[in-house]
Amino acid sequence: MGADKNEAPPAMAIMPDHWIRRMALERGMIEPFVDRQQREGRISFGLSSYGYDARLAPEFKIFTNVDNALVDPKAFSAQSFVEREGPSCVVPPNSFALARTIEYFRIPRDILVICLGKSTYARCGIIVNVTPLEPEWEGHVTLEISNTTPLPARVYAQEGICQFLFLKGESPPEVSYADRGGKYMRQRGVTLPRL
């Protein structure tokens, strides 16, 4: 007997800590990998019950309008940013910075990863945005950090910045990110928009 046409497809499963640990240690899904939540006076990072809290690397591209550049995703100018390295970064009021995770990710073929900002930052008006990590994508994750407040805001390198949730699909896709040669495949460092 066939499935009912109106029947909803099975829900994606969110993967637990023991699966994340196994995939990180046996298949290099997350490198370097922190096996448990770390805090001790820092914004937490590492493995959690159903996700992984990634750390912010100490390199930043801070948006600036010194040269009156137009923000155009089809013709993006690197002159729109100033580069900084260090233990923290001050994001100007109502502006944003690009950064990256310390961790390098290798996503399995049947997994889609979504990212959510840490509540510690969200409660300060600092929003972290990342598009989903698609099946078989790999690289450092470029993070968009928006300061929605009218005041300068500080973010801290080597500490937690966002949480990744791993969703297992009903079956592997016909075409993965690697299969179609995605433009952000194996990115290292903070990567600017590409067309």
Image (tube, helix red, strand yellow):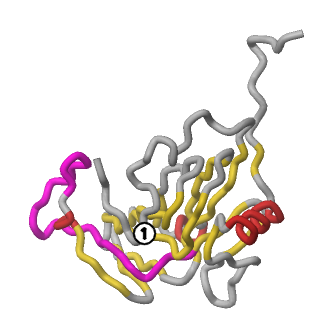
Q: Judge the density around disc 1: few (<14), some (14-19), many (≥20) Cα neighbours within 10 Å.
A: some
Q: Quadrant of the N terminus?
A: top right
- For residue 128, say whether it is visible: yes
In magenta stretch: residue 31: no
> Percent from the top left, x then y, of residue 45?
65, 76
> Percent from the top left, x then y, of residue 160?
58, 75
> Percent from the top left, x then y, of residue 92?
30, 73
Left or right of 49? Residue 45 is: left
Left or right of 175? Residue 80 is: left
**Residue at 13% over, 59% down:** 69
Query: Residue pushed farthest right?
Result: 1
Count how many numbered circles sit on residues in the image: 1
Q: Main secondary structure of the magenta part?
A: loop
Left or right of 115? Residue 193 is: left
Q: Which residue is mark 1?
A: 188
- For residue 127, say whether it is visible: no
In magenta stretch: residue 66: yes
Q: Is residue 191 above or below residue 166?
A: below
Bounds of the magenta span?
Answer: 55-76
Quarter of the view holding residue 84: bottom left
Query: Residue pushed farthest left?
Result: 67
Frontmost residue, 156 versus 23: 23
Q: Is residue 44 above or below residue 24?
A: below
> Percent from the top left, x then y, of residue 64?
21, 69
**Residue at 13% over, 70% down:** 66
Amino acid type, callout 1: Arg
